[in-house]
Image (cartoon, rainbow, N blue to C red):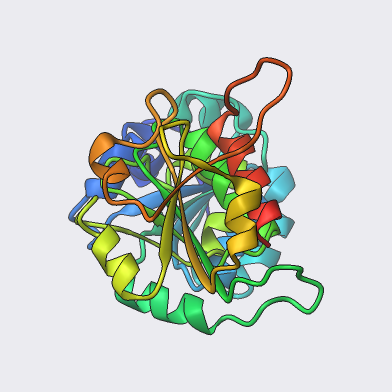
Amino acid sequence: MPIELIHDSEDPRLADYRNLTDTALRRMKEPEDGLYIAESMKVMARAIQAGHTPRSVLTQLKWVEQVEEVLAGRDTPVYLVADDVAERVTGYAVHRGALASMHRPVLPAMASVLRDAALVPPHPESQRTARSRVAVLEGLTDHANVGSAFRNAAALGVDAVLVTPSCADPFYRRAIRVSMGTVFQVPWTRIENWPAGIVDLQAAGYIVAGMTLGEGAITLDRLIEEDHEKLALIFGTEGDGIASETDRRLDRRVTIPMMGGVDSLNVAAASAVVFHATR
């Protein structure tokens, strides 16, 4: 593990961590397919376990041994800096052990994600009757909500997550952090053609159910009673919910029964409720 001590926050070797936003990292053409930043030892370890390749690691002296364990003999360059240098480079206090610049993997095709999701057997302790459940995140703009939805999906046995073109990037640093690295655990991809892609879900045998307060909505309990073999569960954007173009294509409109004068839940909370109820 090559360790390079760096004193200057303007050192060109630190470019991945310095003046690039997550959007810029994603769009980089060199290296091919772009980069993303993994923050903390746990997240970096999960990314590597998922087969992702680190380009470099930025850390401080007290974390070097742990970084070495995570990298497990790789020849990834490790840039060792003082705390104040790390803060000048990134713009914030780096207190989670390390940052890793990771090569962004090529996302799989939607068809292959759905095919693999249909092959996943239920966990022995699962109560769910659906053979396959996928979540669709439509236009979520808050990276914390995206990360929370992935964490919920991992914890409650959802087989895959699909994100629409306008949805926030699951590989954004905050989304990864909030998900506790489960964005590397749950199979996912981006639906390029939306909402027309709903036809592909239906062709694959999925009942497409959108969480909505709109007319004709059935309760979540009723959806469970229908006992569908394959469910695609759509969660709309934080403000307006599911888009009208999407709503017209749904097989089911579903609502979570509310009490106490509350009409809806935050999308992260709603996803947890729905994933648990349909498990």
Q: Is residue 177 visible?
A: no
Identify whether 150 is placed above or below 241: below
Identify whether 139 is placed above or below 210: above
Residue depicted at x 57% and y 29%: 266
Residue 264, x across and y down, in percent: 57, 26
Q: Residue furthest right?
A: 125
Residue 4, x across and y down, in percent: 51, 52
Q: Residue furthest front?
A: 216
Residue in the foreground of this view, choosing between 226 and 91: 226
Tell me if 263 is positioned left or right of 16 in this view: right
Residue depicted at x 28% and y 51%: 249
Identify whether 189 is placed above or below 246: below
Residue in the foreground of this view, choosing between 112 and 279: 279
Residue 59, x across and y down, in percent: 59, 45
Tell me if 165 is positioned left or right of 205 in this view: left
Residue in the foreground of this view, choosing between 162 and 20: 162
Residue 32, image quadrant: bottom left
Residue 115, image quadrant: bottom left
Residue depicted at x 69% and y 58%: 156
Location of the C terminus by quadrant is bottom right
Q: Is residue 167 visible?
A: yes
Residue 145, x across and y down, in percent: 53, 36
